[in-house]
Image (tube, rainbow, N blue to C red):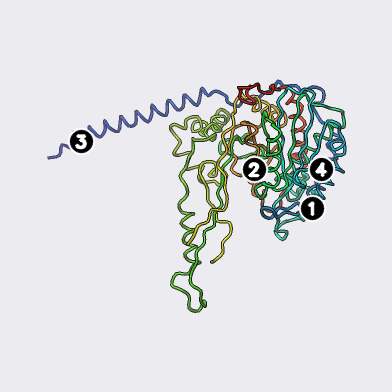
Amino acid sequence: MVDWRRLAKVAGGVVGVVVGVVALLLGVALLRALILEDFDYQEKDIDPGARDELPESYLKGLPAVMARALAIPTVSFSPGNYDVDELLRFHEFLRESFPNVFNSSIIEVEVVNKLSLLLTVKGAQDDFMPYLLMGHMDVVPVDKEKWTHDPWGGLIMPDPSTGESYIWGRGAIDNKVAVIGIMSALEYLARTGFQPERTFYVAFGHDEEVRGKDGAGHMGRLLQERGVKLDFILDEGLPVMKDMIQGMDRPVAAIGVTEKGWLSMDLEVEGPAGHSSMPPLVSAVTRLSRALVALADNPHPSVFGSGPESDMLAYLAPKASWPHKLVFANLWLFKPILEMVLSSKRETNALMRTTTCATIVRAGVKITNLDGTEAHPVSPYGPEVAPWRLLSASIHHHFPEAITVPDLMPGFTDTRHYLPLTGRVYRFNPTFLHVSEMVMVHGHDERVSVSSFTTAVSFYHHLILTADHMVPLRSPPGRRGGEM
């Protein structure tokens, strides 16, 4: 006979233990959240001197230059298929717009593989390690019918709701903002007779949007053949974003310390030919559709915590609002819940797993591996890493409210062609966007605000100046290049 009183007593004890354990875990988690160390390391004390700020009189004329750059359709269509005439026209535009850069005695400009540009800015000291700034001149195609304004119109127009002026055109964010931003900073420095203490390079590829083998691929090999070793690389990445992560009221400046690999494959399904009035019981289109649905319904498992994304949340936790602070500070306890939340948004889902997407569908079972790359090594980050401190200082100077964090770059960049030159590769776009505006990158109505663009120019100017305050010596034999 069942002793219900005894059974209830045992059950009550078990519940009590469970409640006690839960209370203990939550108590530990709460304590951890309350005594968080602030990981938002910012180098606030670097003073590049009197040249620190670009004059308003100079910045005022730059949006028109950016607009003219966007009016040149330097479109890449596929590997080896890009608009050569427009790229050459863009070269001429750069020469006309930035004459002091092209005529400077300390700046050597090389045209690599006929269409890419490699600039060497010669430093006063030969024993300091150089670095590399990157951008790309090409853009992706547009569907003009879906744009509010002409993507090649070179337009500067006010937003009807806010009145803020925007520069419209394909490449406004990806990635002529870097090309014109870097060139504008260099033009002012060349005009004022500036020479850096250490040499640095600037590389503008012409086919990044179609894998970069003809542009960055050639420039990377050229620098490697010359025996160049770099302190660090800065290429395109994510912009400073508002509302990037739930629970964060402040903007987030995510520096990409690695990027995903990618694999491009063809999935072909062949079926019997015939008239549509007498179709096969299961057509090739049906079989292919089932395969694509199965691919979408079975995502790759989460690998959250194996990359920099967990450290990203550790950096954010001290500034997060409750209860997000509690979650970010205690991934050991809340990881399953956090994975579920991050999986619900495409921007964060891409940070935690391999994603798949069908891009072109056509009727025709064989699978063909077309091309791909491995994921990049994770570059060092944190307060003990000089390039990280340098980038953080420039970010803090121009985006004082932003929290600088390490991140995974979900897309791919030209940096893969320069990996043999350094182990410190960073990706960042010095513009400000709301997370909802990211859809215009490779989408429709791409634009950048005038204030965001001029901030990007100032960011590169500040970075070039402050780079002379963190100058590692060229590595002697037996020492790993760039360590400091």
Q: Decide which of tag 2 and tag 1 comes sooner along the chain.
A: 1
Task: Identify the image quadrant of the C terminus.
Answer: top right
Quadrant of residue 428 in the image?
top right
Q: Amino acid at mark 1?
A: Glu
Q: Which residue is mark 3?
A: 7
Task: Measure the alpha-carbon separation of dots 2 and 1.
Answer: 22 Å
Q: CA distance from mark 2 to mark 3?
A: 63 Å
What amino acid type is highlighted by mark number 3? Leu
Tell me which amino acid carries mark 2: Thr
Name the residue rendered at 51%, 22% in the picture: 35
Spatial separation of the CA atoms under disc 4 and disc 1 = 21 Å
Which residue matches tag 4?
63
Residue type, numbered disc 4:
Pro
Residue located farthest toward the left when viewing the structure as drawn: 1
- Tag 1: Cα neighbours inside 10 Å, few (<14), some, or many (≥20)? some
Q: CA distance from mark 3 to mark 4?
A: 77 Å
Nearest to N terminus: mark 3 or mark 4:
3
For numbered disc 2, what is the local secondary structure?
loop
